[in-house]
Amino acid sequence: MIRIAVCCLCLKTKKENLILFGKNICQDCEAELTQSSTEDLSYDLYVKKMKDVLTAPSKEDKNMV
Ligand SMILES: [Zn+2]
């Protein structure tokens, strides 16, 4: 069964790929993450973005309050 979810990194609606802490990371972003090296500038950006995403309260959490 194919599920559609919003990617937490590029914020595009894509096929559910990798669910990390309840958030979807699309195939494109997963590839970017895994292909990036620590010398790559975009790696830093992705790590920062990931931290933002993973530490920010999700919409679901807000709804439950
Ligand atoms: Zn993505």
Image: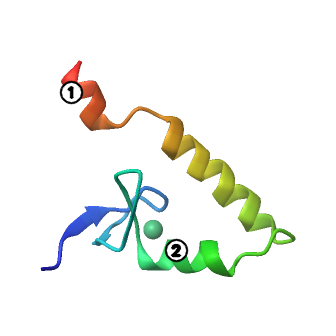
Q: Do the residues labelled 2 and 1 touch (CB within 8 Å)?
A: no
The residue sitting at 81% across, 71% down in the picture is 40
Question: Between 12 and 37, which is closer to the camera in this rendering?
Answer: 37
Picture quadrant of residue 31:
bottom right
Tell whether circle 2 marks a residue whose Cβ is less than 8 angstroms from ligand 1.
yes
Residue bearing mark 1: 63
Screen quadrant of the N terminus: bottom left
Indicate the amino acid at tag 2. Answer: Glu
Instruction: Left or right? Give the position of 25 relative to 55.
Output: left
Extreme residue in the right direction: 39
What kind of element bears circle 2? helix
Residue bearing mark 2: 30
Q: Residues within 10 Å of mark 2 (few under 14, many from 20)?
A: some
Q: Give x and y (percent) for residue 65.
A: 23, 18
What kind of element bears circle 1? helix
Disc nearer the start of the sequence (2/1)? 2
Extreme residue in the front direction: 21
Instruction: Left or right? Give the position of 36 relative to 65.
Output: right
Residue 28: mark: none
The residue sitting at 73% across, 66% down in the picture is 42
Q: In this view, does 19 lie above or below 65?
A: below
Question: Between 11 and 19, which is closer to the camera in this rendering?
Answer: 19
The residue sitting at 52% across, 72% down in the picture is 29
Instruction: Left or right? Give the position of 34 relative to 4.
Output: right
Q: Residues within 10 Å of mark 1 (few under 14, many from 20)?
A: few
